Image (cartoon, rainbow, N blue to C red):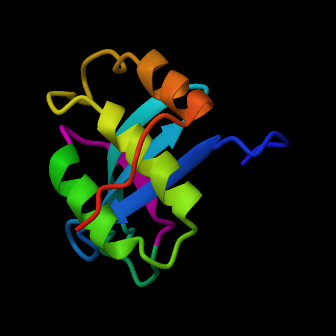
Amino acid sequence: MDEQNRLTAFQLCYQTGAHEHALTWQATTGFNHARVDSGETCGLDYKRTPILLTDGACDAKLLRERFNSAAADLPLDIQRLILGALTAYPNNYRAHAPRPHTHRARRMLKNKKFKLKES
């Protein structure tokens, strides 16, 4: 959050373990979907530092559903901000393509015009 209490970035990690991925959103750059290289498979006696590597598409609908069910302990305004950004994530986004258009996400976050889905 910045000084005006606007969301500036978030990162959601999912499928922890061998297939861990991260969807990162930053207000200045938009979305980035990556897989997590844990550093475990270097074949040496020590573990390397985990890094993010560009990875194909993210199932945004599934990620929204998982976030919606797991975010109960977060403040409602934070839940709404993140769900608003996830709603703006294009379902057909591919990591090798140009970054998705993020003006809609920025506008939604600025105006806070989205609602949390009730289960």
Residue at image position (21%, 72%) is 18
Position of 94 compared to 1: left or right? left
Q: Residue 1, relative to residue 110: is it above or below? A: below
Q: Residue 33, relative to residue 119: is it above or below? A: above
Q: Residue furthest right?
A: 3
Q: Is residue 105 visible?
A: yes
Q: Please, what is the dominant secondary structure of the magenta stretch? A: loop
Q: Residue 61, relative to residue 95: is it above or below? A: below
Query: Toward which corner of the image does residue 104 lie, by quadrant?
Result: top left
Give x and y (percent) for residue 109: 55, 34
Give x and y (percent) for residue 41: 28, 71
Q: Residue furthest bottom?
A: 45
Q: Is residue 20 visible?
A: no
Q: How many discs mark residues in the rendered view?
A: 0
Give x and y (percent) for residue 4: 81, 39
Position of 45 compared to 64: left or right? right
- Whether the magenta-drawn stretch holds residue 50 is answered as yes
Q: Nearer the viewer, residue 30 or 68?
A: 68
Residue at image position (31%, 38%) is 87
Residue at image position (24%, 56%) is 63
Look at the image and tell me in which quarter the C terminus lies: bottom left
Position of 10 compared to 58: left or right? right
The residues colored magenta run 48-59
Q: Nearer the viewer, residue 93 or 97?
A: 93
Q: Residue 53, relative to residue 118: is it above or below? A: above
Query: Toward which corner of the image does residue 13 lie, by quadrant?
Result: bottom left
- Whether the magenta-drawn stretch holds residue 27 is answered as no
